[in-house]
Image (tube, rainbow, N blue to C red):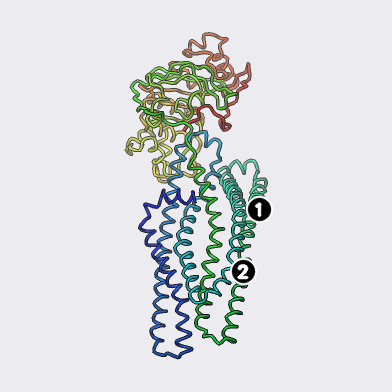
Amino acid sequence: MAVIRRILEENGRDYRWSYVFTILCLLTVSATTALSAWIMSPVVNQIFYERRGDLIPWICAALLGAFILRGLAGYGQAVTMARIGNNLVARYQQRIFNHLMKLGVSFFNDTRSGRLAAQVNENVNGIRDLLSMTITSTARDAVSLVALVGVMIYQDPVLSLSSLLIGPPLIYTVTYLMRRVRRITRESVQINSRLIGAMQEATQGIVIVKAFTMEDELSRRISKLADDAEQRSNKIARVSERLTPISELLAGLAFASVIAYSGYRATVLGQPPGAVFSFITALTLAYDPARRLARMQVGMERALVNARMIYELLDLQPQQGDTSGAAEARITTGEVRFNNVSFGYVPETPVLQELSFVAQAGKMTAIVGASGAGKSTLVALLQRFYDVGQGSITIDGQDISKVTKKSLRGSIAYVSQAPYLFEGTIRDNIRYGRLSATDAEIEQAAKQAAADEFIRQQPEGYDTPVGENGVTLSGGQRQRVSIARAIVRNAPILLLDEATSALDNEAEARVQEALTHVMEGRTTIVIAHRLSTVVNADHIIVLEEGRLVEEGSHAALMADPHSVYARFHRVQGKKGLGLVDDAKPIQTPLPRSRAKKAVRRTA
């Protein structure tokens, strides 16, 4: 009842007149059903027993009118309930998505996207089914049952009492089955979500699947999940359908006893058969709503499981949001300061330790270091995907933990090392940087990102749809589109996390030249493995095991042949590889997705 009450409180006001109309239609169905049973007494007694031919037209007209009215009322309630149900599904889908957008990066690191999507799609219908069954059962089946029982009692109280003895065993059976269905349904939803999620992941990673000849292994895994899902579904069917033979047995006993007793009275005592026919008709008609009510209890338990799982998701609170009274970020020059910042995705594994540096306004600051040194974590903290464990980060003297995240991120343009494109056209994906950007600004940004040439070679130019995650484009092309998206944002702070890692040398040179113009007047923080991309940086920060070990210009750092930066440079010069540490291996991995105990998680 608590779940039903919550759904009604959240949605009842918006659908109140539709519910009123639906309930009136259902009451009409119930009334005409009871009338069909009651009218059997005058039909048998006055037409067949007393041979009153003058009543035939009136009784037939009444019956015809009752059936027509019931048909129209049934149509009206079915269409209205379908409209309400479809709107509820759409409303909760939108509500769930909006809520997911408020949750932090850590939630999505710990939750498989395919499984989450499958679970949401499977459970969201539970809200619709719950309301539909509640309204329909209350206004139609329950009222019909009460009305028909009333007709039965009116016609023959003794027979009514005997037929109602099937109630207690039926109620006990329903209660037992509900408990069984509740547990099995939750297991079924979880297995089905794993199955659909695994299929989605396999299709998204089809290139890797085929490259590593994983088809047979994944087929076996999917087959096992499908078998588990089938077994759970079969078990739900076996448990829930047990109600059918039990209810049929009880109904058969009731009908047999009624016919035996009424037959005895008609043949031995000579009583008129009208009341008996009316009673049997009412009993026959009452069987369907009684059976539906019993099955509804089992079906409602399944819908309740789905609804509870939806609310478990909706009730997840962002672990960190904007602070009370958070102000809008006012970025003027864009100076970024890290003040003694420490952070770890899990407390016992620090990623950054007492990090302090300044990224000067309007200048280019490069962050270099071996893999796992904390470079990408630094960028994530600056955008408040996570909150620092100790210390603070300020922009123009404003502590970013005390400004709204929307205003903070609106002042930052970000290019990740793994470019991501969304469903839509190339133009749409660039416009995501700034929705108010004109077509001319989009094309200018693409030119600056060295993307205009290949875009115009596409079948529909800027209006060419991209495949899932831009699969129709090469890695370098996707990266250039994401760089154009950052350029069109026109933000005072630019973050480049391995922004040119997917480009060939020629394209990288063109993008670097373009970025040089884009960086003018902007505070730019660049993370790069290729040291050739940061030699012109105004300031270089060298990280090692989450600590700042060196900083300065390229010339100053190279002046000391024993510096960490100089060692990195020599390694790249000899091997032509990405940045590695040839002296001491990094022991602190970057646990991106193992963050259940993160320090001050993000919203």
Q: Position of residue 442 (x, y in %)?
A: 36, 36
Mark 2 residue element? helix
Q: Position of residue 413 (x, y in %)?
A: 41, 29
What amino acid is found at the position of numbered circle 2 in the picture?
A: Leu
How many labels were placed on the picture? 2
Q: Which circle's residue, 2 or 1, is located before the other in the chain?
A: 1
- Kindly identify the residue that appears in the image at 37 percent across and 23 percent down: 522
Q: Which residue is mark 2?
A: 250
What amino acid is found at the position of numbered circle 1 in the picture?
A: Asp
Mark 1 residue element? helix
Q: Position of residue 69 (x, y in %)?
A: 39, 73
Q: In the rendered view, would you say 181 is above or below 466?
A: below
Q: Nearer the viewer, mark 2 or mark 1?
A: 2
Q: Position of residue 272 (x, y in %)?
A: 51, 85
- Kindly identify the residue that appears in the image at 64 percent across and 60 percent down: 238
Q: In the rendered view, would you say 581 is above or below 412?
A: above
Snapshot quadrant of residue 299:
bottom right
Snapshot quadrant of residue 443:
top left
Snapshot quadrant of residue 450:
top left
Q: Which residue is mark 1?
A: 227
- Specify the farthest residue to the top: 560
